[in-house]
Image (cartoon, grey):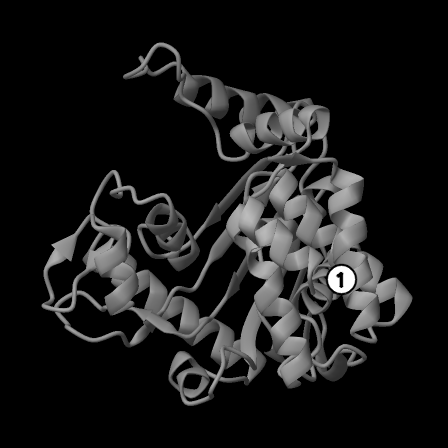
């Protein structure tokens, strides 16, 4: 079913307000969740909201907590998230990175002891809207099997890279697994097979069966050994730069909390040459002959803009069962 964007946001805000969220924070969190679903990232929008509400009740997420500065070194800062709402801490850190980039050309903010940032692309869009290139990444609980291994010891550590563009920002938001765990659960709920292998069954066999992968909780890294290496170095970077928890330490907690994140903003050189370079790269990439004539090659973020427009015009697509669950919270 489809729900108007403002109604979706209002329902999130109602629940958060009843959970004693300060009014401004409740509004910002509700906006992020609604925008995630609006842009088609349902796994980190409506579908994730009941878990978010449960974590607040259990004290995993501290509603009133705000980040505190730990250290500053020129264009780089370290902050402690104090287990506050992950998306609010992330928005704050990207704002700080942009402020540092205004002064220095580049800004880097690392934060420890924070919570899940939901859709990582949110902060790529945030930077791009402000006119800045950005690179962001986070660590997470171990759900990926390293290449050559049989058990999960790598986090599905998302990577976000955004480049501002007048005709529509380029925003790459990717998990390090072939499919995020939320996407696997989505395929499972529809009783559908994954289009390509996405994980392992309990016997260690690579599989396209979403139900078997969900049961084993063993995800396949992108690019096999290459994704395995990328997941590990991202964990190294966020833990070292923030002096926060690593994937191993996150896994020792009962819930996925206290994660580490990095936000980098870069001030691009304004001018026609920059614009022309961006268009040259996008146009050349999109000139490739598509496999399906009805689905031309798209740049990262292009389909997000199409989905956003459709959902704003027709209503945001929601899972009826989860929507009913949220209404009952």
In terms of depth relative to the viewer, which is nearer, 59 or 67?
A: 59
Pointer 1: what residue? 100
Q: As drawn, is 27 to the left or to the right of 29?
A: right
Classify 10 Å Cα crowding around label 1: few (below 14), some (14-19), many (20 and above): many
**In the displayed image of the protein, which residue is found farthest to the top?**
293
Q: Foreground: 296 or 205? A: 205
**Residue toward you, 44 or 112:** 44
Q: Is residue 294 left or right of residue 314?
A: left
Q: Residue at x 69, y 61 (%)?
A: 328
- Quarter occupied by residue 117: bottom right
Q: Quadrant of the N terminus?
A: top right
Residue 47 in percent (x, y) is at 55, 54
Number of labelled discs?
A: 1
Relative to residue 320, is residue 3 drawn left or right?
A: right
Q: In this orientation, does residue 120 appear? A: no
Residue 327, position as x, y percentages in the image? 70, 56
The answer to whether any part of residue 308 appears in the image is yes
Which residue: 9% across, 68% down? 203
Question: Tag 1, which secondary structure?
Answer: helix
Relative height, residue 259 to residue 16 (above, below)? below
- x, y (%) of residue 218? 25, 66
Residue at the farthest right position: 23
Kindly identify the residue that appears in the image at 71 percent across and 24 percent down: 313
């Amino acid at each position: 079913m489809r729900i108007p964007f403002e109604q979706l946001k209002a329902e999130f805000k109602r629940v958060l307000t009843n959970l004693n969220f300060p009014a401004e924070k409740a509004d910002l969190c509700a906006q992020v969740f609604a925008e995630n679903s609006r842009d088609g990232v349902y796994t980190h929008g409506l579908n994730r909201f009941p878990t978010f509400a449960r974590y607040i009740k259990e004290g995993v997420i501290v509603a009133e907590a705000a980040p505190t500065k730990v250290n500053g070194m020129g264009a780089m800062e370290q902050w402690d998230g104090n287990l506050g709402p992950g998306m609010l801490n992330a928005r704050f850190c990207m704002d700080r990175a942009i402020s540092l980039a205004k002064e220095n050309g580049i800004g880097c903010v690392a934060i420890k002891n924070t919570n899940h940032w939901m859709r990582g692309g949110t902060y790529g869009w945030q930077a791009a809207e402000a006119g800045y290139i950005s690179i962001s990444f986070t660590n997470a609980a171990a759900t990926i099997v390293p290449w050559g291994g049989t058990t999960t010891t790598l986090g599905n550590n998302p990577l976000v890279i955004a480049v501002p563009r007048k005709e529509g920002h380029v925003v790459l938001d990717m998990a390090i697994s072939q499919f995020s765990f939320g996407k696997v659960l989505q395929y499972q709920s529809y009783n559908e097979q994954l289009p390509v292998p996405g994980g392992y069954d309990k016997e260690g066999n690579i599989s396209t069966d979403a139900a078997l992968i969900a049961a084993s909780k063993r995800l396949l890294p992108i690019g096999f050994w290459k994704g395995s290496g990328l997941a590990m170095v991202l964990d190294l970077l966020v833990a070292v730069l923030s002096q926060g928890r690593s994937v191993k330490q996150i896994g020792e907690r009962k819930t996925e909390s206290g994660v580490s994140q990095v936000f980098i903003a870069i001030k691009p050189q304004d001018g026609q040459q920059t614009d022309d370079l961006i268009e040259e790269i996008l146009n050349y990439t999109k000139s490739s002959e598509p496999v399906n004539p009805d689905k031309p090659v798209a740049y990262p973020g292009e389909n997000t803009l199409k989905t956003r427009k459709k959902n704003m015009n027709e209503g945001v697509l929601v899972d009826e069962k989860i929507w009913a669950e949220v209404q009952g919270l």
